[in-house]
Image (spheres, grey):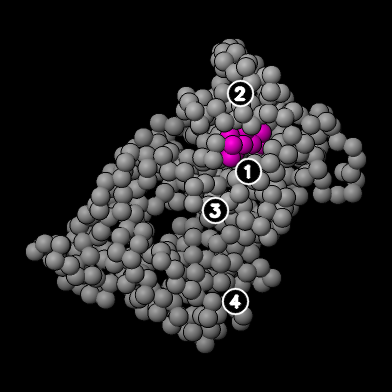
Amino acid sequence: MAVQVPLWQHYLQAIRSRGARRAQDFQRAENVLLTVLEHVHRLDPRFLVDYSRDLEAFQFALRTSEEPLHVEVPLRVEADALLIEEVGAAEAGDGPAPCRLGVSREGARPERRMADDVLSVSSEGGAGCRGHIAPSKVLRVLKDLLVAAVVHCRHQSLVTPGSLNADSLEEKESHLSLLVSSGWRTIRFNIVPMVRRKLWVPALERAQWMRGFPEGSLKRIISQEAALVPASAQHWRVSTDYLLTRLLGALGSLPGHRLDGLSILDRVNHESWRDGGQSPGLTFGHLKTVLLWASALFPAPEDWAELQGAVYRLLVVLLCCLATGNLPHFVYPKRNLLSDAGLDLNALYQRVERFASQPEASLRIHVTHLGRGPPPRIGNGVKALLQLPAGDPAYWATAYFDVLLDKFQVFNIQDEDRISAMQSIFRKTKTLDSKEC
């Protein structure tokens, strides 16, 4: 296995060599977008500009994939005048319940009151409610402002010629989409109106007890204001994107190869599993969720000390999710992120298992890396072992995934308690050995 270490490191170095350029491209494109949003704010002060986007640049540099980037545009609302009305109760762990945002007839100063162009008046609001802030109306107002701002910025030469085109602005149900050129790279931004509000969200409170993250980081993130984003034409929902992106940033402060493993899998996913981005498949969001679960399941620093081992900790979680057809949302675990993805999970599983068994072919990026690789790490039948959590959720635990690491010949932990727990799980699954797990 010693010959594999330079290959993993060389592959990571190739990714890192592009990271600085990607970060610069992002910064140029974001500067163009911020210029436009600043003019939107001048036209309508209700729409604010959020400059705290360092983590988005950091996340973009990690990626190889060219998926749209989300940009939140805060809507200024007088907190005392906001009435939050839940529309039905979501089951615990199933996802955030949609809500309506009512505006009180009292509480806000006259100059800070929400204009009627974004309100939907309903008899259900009661005598104390002027109306509800309708996401569809907010998006319509914001779209008109963006078109005017793009035209102004181009006419006044505030942005580089060719970097913007108002014709590329598209209106979706929950966001606006705009293409921005940063030179030779074009980046699509999904512009999402957002209302900030201090809320108690039970699912976020439960998440702070997760292991594997810097001490106090979850509590600090959760204590900040929640972001409410469009869920439909009339309803809003709590966004977890803000939380998950900051959790990813928190993992970057820990020693080890957590983020390196994510970068490698995203590159392999883009180049091999998605045929250079030409085929449908896993998104960076899917892989980010896999890393968050892997970090919670493998909280010990020694799990992430070696690059190859770090990648395989993500791989065993990903393979298990594909084999069971269930990738739980990190905050709302009853929500399956694979259920609405429209993917051929069986074909995708085969590709990921092939890489996990013989990764060398996908890691070769230069002619000098060609040659005979080592034999497959596993035989047929490992899928039966990977499907165990579907029948018994108790298997979703460190000891079970340690067994999987051992199957792929990358379990190198010396902790006696973990070895004992792994052996206990192994004895329970010994009937699967006859199937060459």
Q: Quadrant of residue 127?
A: bottom left
Counting residues from the start of the chain, the first of labels 2 and 4 encountered is 4
Name which residue lies at 31% across and 45% down: 90
- Residue type for callout 4: Ser
**Horizontal placement of 65 versus 171: left or right?**
right
In magenta, the rendered stretch is 310-323
**Horizontal placement of 201 versus 159: left or right?**
left
- Residue type for callout 2: Asp
CA gap between label 3 and label 2 equals 30 Å
Q: Is residue 387 visible?
A: yes
Q: Write down the residue under mark 4.
A: 163
Q: Quadrant of the N terminus?
A: top right
- Nearer mark to the viewer, of 1 and 4: 1
- Residue type for callout 3: Gly
CA gap between label 3 and label 4 equals 33 Å
> Of residues 343 and 332, which is closer to you in this image?
343
Q: Write down the residue under mark 2.
A: 402
